[in-house]
Amino acid sequence: MVTKVGLAGTGFIGSGIARLIVNHHSDLEVSSVLTRRLTEELSLFPSTKGVTQSIAKFVESCDLVVECSGDPVHATNVVDAALQAGKPVVTMNSEFHVTTGSYFVDRGYLTEAEGDQPGCLAALREDMLQMGFKPLVYGNMKGFLNHNPSPEDMLYWSRRQGIAPSQTTAFTDGTKMQIEQVLIGNAAGATIAQQGLIGIKSDDLNVAADELCKVAVGLDSPIVDYTLSSKLAPGVFIAATHDACEVQALKYYKLGEGPYFALLRPYHLCAFETIKTIRRAINGGSVLLNNGSEPRLSIAAIAKRVIKRDEVIDAPTGGFMIRGEAVEVSKANDHVPIGILKGARLLTNIEPGQMLTWSDVELIDSLAARIAKSLFCRIKILAA
């Protein structure tokens, strides 16, 4: 039996998933493709069957939706339509989850995919829990960080790496990593040690993991955080404890002296791994991860430069006006989630480093904005 897969998104990730399905998975079919691009821009896309700009037609033409647009506002509309139609949804879109994903948690089958860092951490967590480990740190491994890169540098690296300038910028200024860590944190019931995370600079993973584990023990809670090193693998790790009676066995298996043990997954292959979660959904498997219905963590918008009243935010993630930082909702309950700020007009002057609040902006009306405002107002009331 062939499963009809609908792809919402025709960028780097969408193209990769389509190639894999077309070239390697005969029991899957790309039956519909949702895009906002012009038709002539899709000449190199691996599958042009069922290309449409209509969400309704897109959803109608598939058995399962894969949302990978990277746009949380657009994704909210797609996921809403898909779940209302009873279609399972697999995403490669952590931006969506930390913006409005919690609203959809109990409305149908919705899961982030393995492949990006949160999904890889979730899969590693499943393995480690089965082995009896008790996770303390969910770690992202970053090779370079510049909170305020120049447009010229980002254009250069965008062309060199073959990805969009906005993606390059969001990777470089840390916004994407902060989003990823908030998602796995909410999924795994972890917290953060501080706003914006710590970020241990070390070329030795065990040293970094031990330091972060001590922070988690001091907080009496697992945490999400990251390492910063150009020499460590661009993967993920989980640092954990185990039973005292197992320390000698783990030492034998070359995991170190304890009491903290770091398991490394030295890669994340995005589109290449998404197929695993698609099959998980088709086979009736459980949700790999989502943002939870009551998220403790969120992504606030931090000004990179002076922003004048009446300026309009052109790109919330991957732009040069703001960047994202992980926050505890209970400690930043007036923050406006960065994912709904595209096109927002500033109502006040904002200084560099200042966090944007609901009263600072006039938002473009959208389903995502309405959901986010309702969701975070409810969380604020519950936290009071």
Image: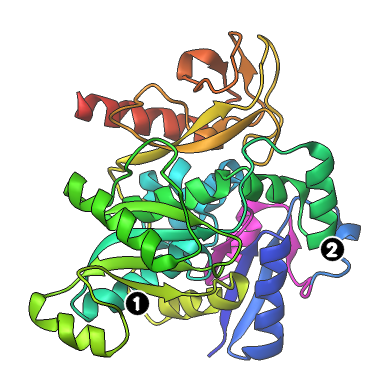
The disc labelled 2 sits on which kind of residue? Leu
Q: Which mark is residue 246?
A: none
Residue 211 x %, y %:
32, 55
Query: At 70% across and 21% down in the image, what residue appears?
Result: 312
Query: At 80% across and 53% down in the image, what residue appears?
Result: 158
Q: How is the image coloured?
A: rainbow
**Label 2 element class:** helix
- Left of 186 or right of it: where is 344? right
Against 242, is 227 above or below?
A: above
The 10 Å Cα crowd at callout 1, few under 14, some 14 to 19, many 20 or more, is few
Magenta segment: 46-69
Q: Alpha carbon of mark 2 to alpha carbon of mark 1: how far?
A: 33 Å
Magenta region includes residue 270 = no
* The C terminus: image quadrant: top left
Instruction: Looking at the picture, tell me which residue is in the foreground, 131 or 297.
Output: 131
Quadrant for residue 363, please give it.
top right
The disc labelled 1 sits on which kind of residue? Gly
Against 344, is 251 above or below?
A: below
Quadrant for residue 72, please give it.
top right
Query: At 14% across and 82% down in the image, what residue appears?
Result: 246
Magenta region includes residue 56 = yes
Against 338, is 358 above or below?
A: above
Q: Which residue is mark 1?
A: 285
Instruction: Looking at the picture, tell me which residue is in the foreground, 100 or 332.
Output: 332
Q: Which residue is mark 2?
A: 42
